[in-house]
């Protein structure tokens, strides 16, 4: 899965790399001090959503990232 500014979120094994996700979160407006914690929480929540809804983990993660992006945009207004 690719994110803004060329950040790739998948590791070589195909799973989401939380460190890369943390960088992507920072690009979306997440405070740097919280980005790693939030990345780990997002990966866990994406796993839960994927299991609950039957959709791919990548789709669940994209959905969560979009919600966070909208939330940060609203706060910036």
Image: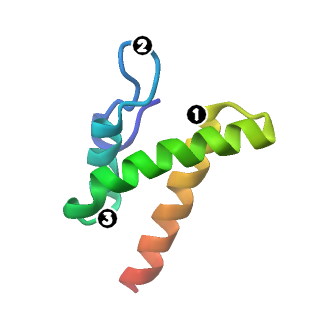
Residue sitting at the far top: 13
Q: 10 or 27: nearer the eye?
A: 10
**Residue 68 image label:** none
**Local crowd size for mark 2, using a 10 Å CA cut-off: few (<14), some (14–19), many (≥20):** few
Q: Nearer the viewer, mark 1 or mark 2?
A: 2
| Quadrant holding the C terminus | bottom left
At a point 58% along the width and 43% down the height, the residue shown is 46
Looking at the image, which is closer to me, 22 or 66? 22
Compute the Cα span from label 2 to label 3: 27 Å
Q: In the orientation shown, which residue stands out farthest toward the left?
A: 33
Residue at x 49% of width, y 72% of height: 71
Please name the residue that numbered disc 2 is placed on.
Answer: 13
- Kind of element beneath mark 3: loop
Judge left or right: residue 14 versus residue 27: right
Under circle 1, the secondary element is helix
- Residue 74: x %, y % from top left: 47, 80
**Separation (CA) of disc 1 from disc 3:** 21 Å
- Colouring mode (rainbow / by chain / secondary structure / one colour): rainbow
- Quarter-wise, where is residue 16 in the image? top left
Q: Quadrant of residue 58?
A: top right
Mark 3 nearby-residue class (10 Å; few <14, some 14–19, many ≥20): some
Give the x, y percent position of residue 42: 48, 49
Foreground disc of the pair 2, 3: 2
Q: Say which residue label 1 marks.
A: 58
Q: Is 36 situated left or right of 42 in this image?
A: left
Kindly identify which residue carries mark 3.
29
- 4 versus 7 height, above or below: below
Give the residue at x 42% y 32%.
2
């Amino acid at each position: 899965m690719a994110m803004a500014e060329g950040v790739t979120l998948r590791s070589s094994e195909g799973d989401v790399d939380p460190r890369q996700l943390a960088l992507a979160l920072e690009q979306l407006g997440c405070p740097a001090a919280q980005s790693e914690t939030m990345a780990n929480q997002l990966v866990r929540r994406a796993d839960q959503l994927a299991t609950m809804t039957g959709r791919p983990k990548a789709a669940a993660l994209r959905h969560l990232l979009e919600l966070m992006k909208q939330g940060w945009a609203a706060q910036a207004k």
